[in-house]
Amino acid sequence: MTIQIIVPELGESVIEATVRRWLKKEGDFVEAGEALVELETDKVNLEVGAKASGVLAKINASEGQDVKVGDSLGTINENAKQPASQPATSPTLAAAEIALAPGKEPMTQSQAPLVTPVAARFAREQSVDPAQVSGTGPEGRVTKSDVERFVQQQNVVAREETKTLAPPLPTAIVELTARREERERMSRRRRTIAQRLLEASQSTAMLTTFNEVDVSAMMDLRRRRNEAFQARYGVKLGVTSFFVKASVSALKAFPRLNAEIQGDEILLKYYYDVGVAVGSEEGLVVPVIRDADRLSFAQIEKQIKEFSVKTNQGALTVEDLRGGTFTVTNGGVFGSLLSTPILNQPQVGILGLHKVEERPIVINGQIAAHPMMYLALSYDHRIVDGREAVQFLVHIKELIEDPERLLLEG
């Protein structure tokens, strides 16, 4: 009996995926439930398993090909038996062997390094054995940055060896050979990010308003309470949780920033699912903190930490990324002093945080250096007026500058 390998439901509003890599090849015997192929969507990567034991008879969708929900990826011949000469292999071991450099012996499962999916693909493209790379990610996991650094080091070594073995080339030839180019296919996530950013700029009346906030009181509170907070809850008291709580308070005061446009109607939402932008190897992702208005600072910090770990491990789920009514993004962690964040449609508001810098300000006629942060609020002017946007940002500024009030309201 022939069993079709079908592209499964991929999650809310996701109808298309890209075949990232096959874990099995035609002619391999597979067990029921064993992972066959990895698909990449604009949100998460997922594996499709075998519904029955048998031989992978045919692959219909090659690596890099776009497929839709319900498409056939391949077929399994359920009547075929496992060849006696073919030992059973686990998907974990198969995944560990995908990036072996030429001439390398396959490693055992216990020797297989922890490698993120993006790093594994990049290592395979560069013919690098991940076992040779020192991982800097969580639990020693090898990331794409680790592989890139390893490749750069190998290139430096190769150039030095070339210098010692060959006479120097004429200057003109050196200049020509230095003009290196590389072409790589956009990942599905990067393509989707590009498309949505373009759509947001073309289909919304997006404006950005700015303010600055004195974070002295917030930083002082964190210094005084962080040690006890971390001992009690197991996470640090970060900056983002203050702004998530302040944003919820501002959204309650100015509900149009927690809405969306549906045709000629405005859908006002009285629940507060706040997306927190997290940088990943393949672009920005925005996991969502559900019912942020009902959570404590500790609960928010724990979710942010969990999202960061899952992002580094490529383990975010569709549910982690689904929905969201408002977004907070912190470019300050990368050193950004000022920016204009782009709306995460269909949301109509996004708050941008930036680098904290000491600047001279005037207080009661006296000049003093205070830690200051620029805030940016981008909003859809079709339903949010400038006055509302300015007042929304002032509301957040007042809460951050008086965090005791924020704690009382929370």
Image (spheres, grey):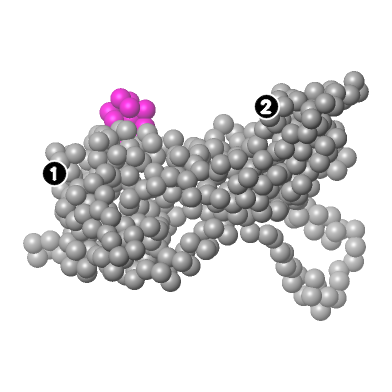
Q: Quadrant of residue 56?
A: top right
Residue 22 locus on image (x, y percent): 74, 41
Q: How many circles with numbers are drawn on the protein?
A: 2
Residue 26 locus on image (x, y percent): 83, 38
The answer to whether residue 166 is above or below residue 9 is below
Say which residue appears at 15% left-offset and 48% top-offset.
402
Q: Secondary structure at mark 1?
A: helix
- Residue 330 shown left or right of residue 178 in the figure: left
Q: Quadrant of residue 341?
A: bottom left
Residue 107 locus on image (x, y percent): 78, 29
Closest to the camera, between mark 2 and mark 1, is 2
Q: CA distance from mark 2 to mark 1?
A: 53 Å
Query: Mark 1 is on which residue type?
Result: Arg
First in sequence: mark 2 vs mark 1: 2
Query: Mark 2 is on which residue type?
Result: Gly
Residue 55 locus on image (x, y percent): 82, 31
Q: Which mark is residue 33?
A: 2
Q: Quadrant of residue 375?
A: bottom left
Q: Which sits in the foreground, 81 or 152?
A: 81
Q: Secondary structure at mark 2?
A: loop
Q: Is residue 254 visible?
A: yes
- Residue 265 shown left or right of residue 48 in the figure: left
Q: Which sits in the foreground, 204 or 374?
A: 204
Q: Is residue 94 magenta?
A: no
Q: Which residue is mark 1?
A: 405
Quadrant, the N terminus: top right
Say which residue appears at 31% left-offset and 57% top-offset.
260
What residue range appears in magenta? 228-240
Q: Which sits in the foreground, 124 or 146?
A: 124
Say which residue appears at 28% left-offset and 61% top-offset.
265
Quadrant, the C terminus: top left
